[in-house]
Image (spheres, helix red, strand yellow):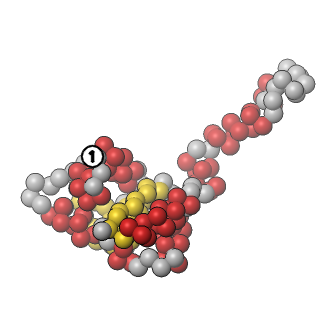
Amino acid sequence: MSKIVAKLFRDPRDATNALAELKKKGFPDDEIGILSRPDGRQGQKVAFPGIGEIVTGGAIKPSIAEAEAKPEKPALAAALAQILKLPEDAAGYFEFGVSMGGVLVTVHTADEKAGAAREILRASSPSAHSANAFAPGFTQASRMAATDPVDAPMSGDFRKY
């Protein structure tokens, strides 16, 4: 029996790192699926109502292309819910992430290899460059938490804290 493991990456560079690690660990290209905005990426372009054009490749490509070709044109969330066997609200999260420029990486593999794929995708956590790119305020806010105002001498200048 096969399993599907999926992760949405906010930063395409993190997705690229995860894909490289999956290939390095022996996952073949036909088990790895990718779904993203077209932004210069190669793959089959498909269009869904409400999201527009997206690029798909690898293991998820035939299922996405089949869903897009249906005459009733389902939403991407409905297609993902059916393909990934998820509740539609969870698939809606993936649809929103892809529409905002994220990259969905899926691994369609046997049960015994699913755990390894899950660990690789989890280990590909957001890098430092992506944290600062999406939320520059966190760098400034961490400075406030770096000192404990109770232990620090009070100077009256609260911008230090």
Task: Report the number of numbered marks.
Answer: 1
Q: Residue at x 87, y 26 (%)?
A: 151
What quarter of the picture does the C terminus occupy? top right
The residue carrying mark 1 is: 88
- Three-letter amino acid code at disc 1? Glu
Q: Residue at x 32, y 71 (%)?
A: 59
Residue 112 falls in which quadrant of the image? Answer: bottom left
Whether residue 128 appears in this view of the structure is yes
As drawn, 5 above or below 75: below
Q: Where is residue 75 in the image (x, y as percent from the top left)?
A: 22, 51
Describe residue 142's horizontal placement relative to residue 29 as left or right.
right
Residue 62 falls in which quadrant of the image? Answer: bottom left
Q: Position of residue 50 (x, y in %)?
A: 25, 48
- Please tell me which residue lies in front, 29 or 35: 29
Q: Where is residue 158 in the image (x, y as percent from the top left)?
A: 79, 24
- Please tell me which residue lies in front, 139 or 106: 106
Describe residue 97's horizontal placement relative to residue 161 as left or right.
left
- Please tell me which residue lies in front, 13 or 60: 60
Q: What element carries label 1?
A: helix
What quarter of the picture does the N terminus occupy? bottom left
Q: Position of residue 33 (x, y in %)?
A: 36, 68
